[in-house]
Amino acid sequence: MQAKMLLALVVGSLTFGVGCHRNTRESAKDDAERAADKTEDTAEKVGDKVEDAAEEAGDKIEDATDK
């Protein structure tokens, strides 16, 4: 899951870098804010998936010890 988050950060950074070269300063600022928002959203999704997987694993362990 961390690998996906790091990949999202790298792709976001590359997109930001290419975008800044072509756009005006104001547009580049907007692009950076959008990239940061997308990166944050992706990180939240990854965190939610990790949390869900941990809960599922805990439930399986609990079920196994109840038997």
Image (spheres, rainbow, N blue to C red):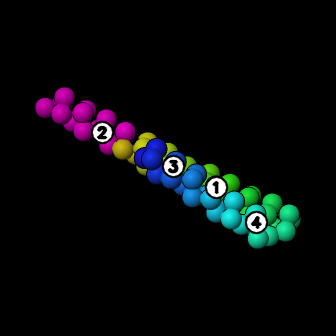
> Which contiguous range is marked in magenta?
54-67
Secondary structure under the numbered disc 2 in the rendered image: helix
- For label 4, the residue is 21
Q: CA distance from mark 1 to mark 4?
A: 13 Å
Q: CA distance from mark 2 to mark 3?
A: 21 Å
Q: Earlier in the sequence, mark 1 or mark 4?
A: 1
Q: Quadrant of the C terminus?
A: top left
- In the rendering, at what x and y percent does residue 44 appear? 55, 49
Q: CA distance from mark 2 to mark 4?
A: 46 Å
Residue drawn at (19%, 28%), measured in percent from left and top? 65
Q: Amino acid at mark 2?
A: Ala
Pointer 1 with pointer 4, Cβ within 8 A: no
Pointer 2 with pointer 1, Cβ within 8 A: no
Q: Residues within 10 Å of mark 4 (few under 14, many from 20)?
A: few
- For label 3, the residue is 5
Q: Residues within 10 Å of mark 1 (few under 14, many from 20)?
A: some
